[in-house]
């Protein structure tokens, strides 16, 4: 496994659409018949030019199963046939996000999916509201950069301006209440039935793990084996601020092993608190060059701006390696890099999509989870910025809540492989342990030095072995050494 430092921390919620099939016609739920399922052979072409013979198709499903008059929407899928003489249960890949395109991921990483065909057929698909059927807002939301804004004002601006996006999709005839993880879980089972499959295995990371757990809860009898990484449990959609504080502790431990860095950063959390207090006392005004106009722009930086930029890097694989240098430079009075990213984010990069707003808003959080988040927020370094835009934007959109029965701990005897990374602040090891407590036939593999989410491709031997029915002999795997950005 390898990690390469990443320099770009521009935050934005962008969902790209990859087109390969014509949009299926929309009908009403009463008209479901054999014509609503289509499949045909074709040649699947990856981004790198590699090709593989496969099947592609589309299944029409009700947009909102609670509405008997619901229209039908297409679920596009691709199936790679197994090379095994005795294939196991077909593997359904669940993309993250929410809003990720399984088909697009296969185009970028065809090699891994091809290797999975040694076990069974592999099915990738675009969940409702994703891929070809993506639901992006038609514009970016701009935030003030010529004055300091706090998180409360940002939430107010985004909540109010994003409602035009909700209206945009409703005016197109979309029943947004149908865009929940429960409806998506039923989509997978309906696709299984359409393909005449008795049982499927599930493979999902990040939101894909949340998706997998929901399918297990609703359709357990149709599941064979499950592999989930970077686990977002059914009550883990909203993150705990304390997990990010622990992440800074973990980084600090690694810094202490590096004499040169430790001399400059003896206590990362203390240094970061000093930076945040400095901005609370007096915001920074930083001159930057606008690359489009060539003009000098004054960017006003407050506490929220820095918290958001650090949160964007925290726990996200090699991006975490930039955090110590980022905080050190700010502590030395150099805010230029953060100002550049903040300006770009506030003027161009805040792009939302209706689908993930509905999905995450509906999954929500239990009362106990919300109370814990509130109790941790004030004393934590990043506060509730770790849940950027939620639950507030979901509330503004009047998203239907899936309820505590959905979020209740899952109990199952299904064989499940859980994979967690020690440097993952978004879905920490503790998430995996909590979910594993209700899964009596689970194994929890912990990979050191890995952030969010652990890569299936990097752990392909373990994943393939488990899907073949093997028991793993090693539950702690040494991952890459974190190489922190140099401090000049």
Image: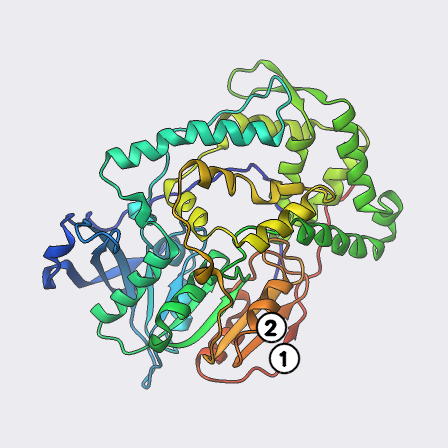
Marking on residue 474: 1
Instruction: Name the one closer to the observer, 368 or 147.
Output: 368
Q: How is colour applied across the structure in the image?
A: rainbow
Question: What quarter of the picture does the C terminus occupy?
Answer: top right
Q: Earlier in the sequence, mark 2 or mark 1?
A: 2
Write the residue at 65% across / 32% down: 304
Residue 483 seen in the current view: no
Residue 376 seen in the current view: yes
Q: Residue furthest top?
A: 295
Sort mark 2 into few (<14), some (14-19) or many (20+) by Cα contacts within 10 Å.
many
Write the residue at 32% across / 55% down: 126
User: Residue 265 appears in which quarter of the rendering?
Assistant: top right
Query: In the image, is 26 to the left or to the right of 4?
Result: left
Residue 421 x, y percent position in the rendering: 62, 63
**Residue for badge 2:** 445
Between disc 2 and disc 1, the foreground one is 2
Write the residue at 33% across / 55% down: 127
Sort mark 1 into few (<14), some (14-19) or many (20+) by Cα contacts within 10 Å.
few
Question: What quarter of the picture does the N terminus occupy?
Answer: bottom right
User: Residue 246 appears in which quarter of the rendering?
Assistant: bottom right
Residue 117 x, y percent position in the rendering: 37, 73
Say above or below: 113 vs 358: below
Query: In the image, is 453 to the left or to the right of 13?
Result: right
> Mark 2 and 1 residues: CB-CB less than 8 Å, in contact?
yes
Residue 374 x, y percent position in the rendering: 64, 45
Residue 375 x, y percent position in the rendering: 68, 47
Kind of element beneath mark 1: loop
Say above or below: 330 vs 19: above
User: Residue 275 appears in which quarter of the rendering?
Assistant: top right
Kind of element beneath mark 2: strand
């Amino acid at each position: 496994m390898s990690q390469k430092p990443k320099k770009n921390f521009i935050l934005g919620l962008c969902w790209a659409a990859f087109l390969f099939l014509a949009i299926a016609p929309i009908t009403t739920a009463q008209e479901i018949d054999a014509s609503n399922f289509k499949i045909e052979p074709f040649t699947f072409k990856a981004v790198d030019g590699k090709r593989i013979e496969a099947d592609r198709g589309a299944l029409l499903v009700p947009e909102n199963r609670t509405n008997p008059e619901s229209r039908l929407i297409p679920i596009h899928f691709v199936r790679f046939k197994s090379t095994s003489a005795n294939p196991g249960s077909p593997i359904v890949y669940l993309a993250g996000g929410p809003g990720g395109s399984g088909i697009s991921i296969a185009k970028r990483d065809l090699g891994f999916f091809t290797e999975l065909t040694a076990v069974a057929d592999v099915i990738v698909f675009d969940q409702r509201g994703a891929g070809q059927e993506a639901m992006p807002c038609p514009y970016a939301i701009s935030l003030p950069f010529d004055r300091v804004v706090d998180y409360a004002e940002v939430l107010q601006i985004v909540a109010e301006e994003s409602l035009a996006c909700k209206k945009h999709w409703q005016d197109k005839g979309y029943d947004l209440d149908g865009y929940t993880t429960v409806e998506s879980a039923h989509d997978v089972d309906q696709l299984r039935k359409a393909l005449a499959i008795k049982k499927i295995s599930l493979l999902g990371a990040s939101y894909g793990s949340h998706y997998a757990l929901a399918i297990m809860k609703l359709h357990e009898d149709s599941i064979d084996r499950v592999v989930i990484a970077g686990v977002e449990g059914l009550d883990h959609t909203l993150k705990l601020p304390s997990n990010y504080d622990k992440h800074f502790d973990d980084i600090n431990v690694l810094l202490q092993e590096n004499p040169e860095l430790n001399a400059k950063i003896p206590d990362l959390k203390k240094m970061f608190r000093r930076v945040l207090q400095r901005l609370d006392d007096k915001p920074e005004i930083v001159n930057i060059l606008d690359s489009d106009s060539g003009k000098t722009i004054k960017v006003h930086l407050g506490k929220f701006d820095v918290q958001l930029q650090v949160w964007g890097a925290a726990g996200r694989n090699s991006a975490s390696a930039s955090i110590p240098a980022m905080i050190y430079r700010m502590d030395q009075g150099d805010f230029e890099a953060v100002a550049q990213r903040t300006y770009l984010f506030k003027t161009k990069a805040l792009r939302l999509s209706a689908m993930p707003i509905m999905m995450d808003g509906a999954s929500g959080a239990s009362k106990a989870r919300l109370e814990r988040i509130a109790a941790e927020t004030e004393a934590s370094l990043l506060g509730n910025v770790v849940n950027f835009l939620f639950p507030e934007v979901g509330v503004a959109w009047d998203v239907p809540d899936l309820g505590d029965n959905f979020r209740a701990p899952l109990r199952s005897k299904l064989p499940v492989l859980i994979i967690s990374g020690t440097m993952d602040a978004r879905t920490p090891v503790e998430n995996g342990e909590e979910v594993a407590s209700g899964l009596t036939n689970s194994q929890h593999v912990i990979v050191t030095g890995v952030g969010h989410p652990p890569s299936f491709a990097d752990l392909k031997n373990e994943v393939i072995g488990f899907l073949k029915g093997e028991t793993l002999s090693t539950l702690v795997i040494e991952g890459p050494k974190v190489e922190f950005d140099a401090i000049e």
